[in-house]
Amino acid sequence: MVEDGIFLKSLDLFKEAFPGRINQILKSKEEGKKIIGTLCLYVPDELIYACGADRVILCGGRSATIAAAEEYLPRNLCPLIKSSFGSVIDQKCSKTKSCPHFGLVDLIVAEATCDGKKKMYELMDKYIPTYVMDLPQKPENQNAQEYYIKELESLKDVLEKLTGNKITDAQLRNEIKSANETRKLLHAIYELRKIDSPPIRGTEMLKVLQQMHFLSPGEFRKNLVLLLDELKLKKRENSGPRIMISGCPMAAGNMKVPEIIENRGGLIVAEESCTGTRAFWDLVDEKKEPMKAIAERYLKIPCACMYPNERRINQILKLAGDFNVDGVVYYTLQFCHGYNVEKYRVGEALKKSGIPLLSIETDYSGADTEQIKTRVDAFLEMLE
Amino acid sequence: MISIGIDAGAATTKAVVLRDNEIAGYTIIPTGFDFRKAGEKAFEEVLSNCGISESKVGTILATGYGRNSIGFADKTISEITAHARGVGYLIPAAHTIIDIGGQDSKVISTENGKVVDFLMNDRCAAGTGKFLEYTAKALEISLDELGTLALVSKNPANISSMCTVFAESEVISLRAQKTKKEDIAAGLIESIILRTTAMVKKLGIKPEVAFVGGVAKNPGVVKAFEKALDIAVLLPEEPQITGALGAALLV
Ligand code: SF4
Ligand code: SF4
């Protein structure tokens, strides 16, 4: 990708948000607010905020905390799980102290997605109280929604008990409205990435999305408004083969592959991931009964833990077309079986549509950087 | 016009001189510790081999694992693109390229010398030249001997470890069980063939199939490949230089 040297000032708001946000959480706590930790998109923010709690994401993207986690967890486990767990258990270690928010969490609201996470939650509970909500594994089943709503009701009880506040329909509707605003802003920004010379690069966008569940929704939204304004004003010359990333989440701290892609000349125009479209794509229907509308929306998230997941393949093909993608980089974390196994069917579908695919399976270490560079170079050369 | 392609591989550095689109000469030297030094040495050597002075050289293109260390190159290109081009020049009928080098192995699907798809093995030595090198050591024979020895085996041993380190200990325990040397050698070769054919099949075989890289010089491996893929594989006269040649052609 060719850079034009024009900087987006509003991006600093996301980059520099960390210390401010920690102070904010500290203050919330002093005011008696409860802090909820989450690790997955299937846990609706709306419920947490409707009962007056605050929320931070605990997904780990850094390798520094992995060694500590491996004292408890097997080596051949997804690095995201190990990194997250490592941050929890290693609060006192100087290397991991940069995640002080873990120590401020009152309750982790976890979810039954992949096996590795589920089992890790059993261990995590020893350090921070952890509540695991169940998810229907076949979300397209007739009774799936009903079941998920029941789980949401139970979560509601848990949150109400923890905070001492009641979640009313009016509050829920308010939160839904605000969350939809955020989703619409992200759609507007992604719309700009469809054009020939998008005003924002993939590595820049990823850093924004990595903050989505770390910042408070209000602050995140405020920053997005500023970013969108700036993007509309500034014309930037970003070019290179148009790449879409698809696959596992890239939690904050994990920038390896997108950075290689853009440093080597590619231009990331979309990311089908939980630090991408899956985080904001569908809106919650504001006309429907709130719990039902929330359930409807969240069950649409096309995570590879679910079966069947044809919807994800369809979404990838649609995005590839809409964003005028030249090639897809299928990104997976080692030992993430869901996304690694689903790769085959995604690859078949892309092949049929004539869209080239490069698959990269990696972890948080830098050991394979050179190998990845070679593949990315060859892929970009092939697309040119 | 004179151009030079340098393939800075993990085990060997190759340089090819191209004069008016014809190969004027080449060299293959061990890389050693320093990619840059090896690149410089290969460059000087190939020029003196061909009796060409440095001032006559037009463009220099570097490829291979250490390509970014070759500071005097005008441009770099990935070895996948380079091999496709080099093989396309030498064996125009080839549409599938298998390259097993010291550090990695790859399978490339091509159309008119251009890459249309490729697969590379993952991050470890399994299925590469290194695998054979280490395990040959455990048999106390040279790499060349491994290939010729394997040819006489009637009953290849079953080596189940993909990992080089584990395979090495497996070889030692097979020796302790008095398994014949040639059977172990053949088993080792079958093990890397198994890995690579899985990649070839994943990508799809489009004839003709060309086999390049250092391991292609091993007759035992070539024979085993033909058997596993059920197709004759084509070898360039010098299978190690296709990357450097491709780079020289791509300037
Ligand atoms: S990939 Fe699946 S399990 Fe992971 S955060 Fe996304 S929805 Fe949750
Ligand atoms: S990336 Fe895969 S294995 Fe890791 S936590 Fe998410 S779903 Fe589980």
Image (cartoon, coloured by chain):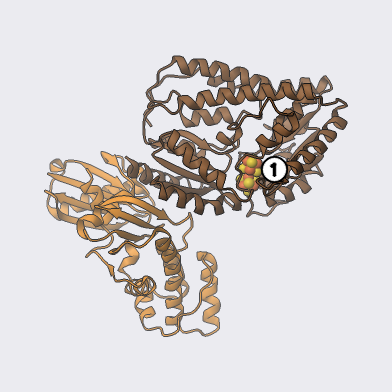
Chain colours: A brown, B orange
Q: Please state if B236 lies on the left or on the right of A332 as rendered.
A: left
Q: Which chain carries label 1?
A: A
Q: Can the viewer see residue A79 in this picture?
A: no
Vertical arrangement, residue B125 with respect to residue A59, above or below: below
Is A184 positioned to the left or the right of B209 in the image? right
Determine whether, in the image, residue A141 is placed left or right of residue B132: right
Left or right for B190, reference A70: left
For disc 1, the marked residue is A86
Total of numbered circles in the picture?
1
**Which of the 4 quarters of the picture holds residue A218?**
top right
Q: Which residue occupies 46% across, 16% down?
A: A232
> Where's residue A381, x and y in %?
33, 43
Judging depth in this view, the residue of A320 and B90 nearest the camera is A320
Q: What quarter of the picture does the C terminus of chain A occupy?
A: top left
Depth check: give the residue in front, A44 or A103: A44
Q: In which quarter of the image is residue A193?
A: top left
Q: Is residue B144 visible?
A: yes
Whether A308 is drawn above or below B202: the answer is above
Question: In front: B44, or A261?
Answer: A261
In the rendered structure, which amino acid carries the disc numbered 1?
A: Gly
Q: Does the residue labelled 1 lie within 8 Å of ligand 2?
A: no
Percent of width and height locating residue B71: 31, 40
Image height check: is B98 above or below A371?
Answer: below
Q: Is mark 1 on a helix, strand or loop?
A: helix
Q: Label 1 crowding class (10 Å Cα cut-off): few <14, some 14-19, many 20+?
A: many
The front one of B143 and A240 is A240
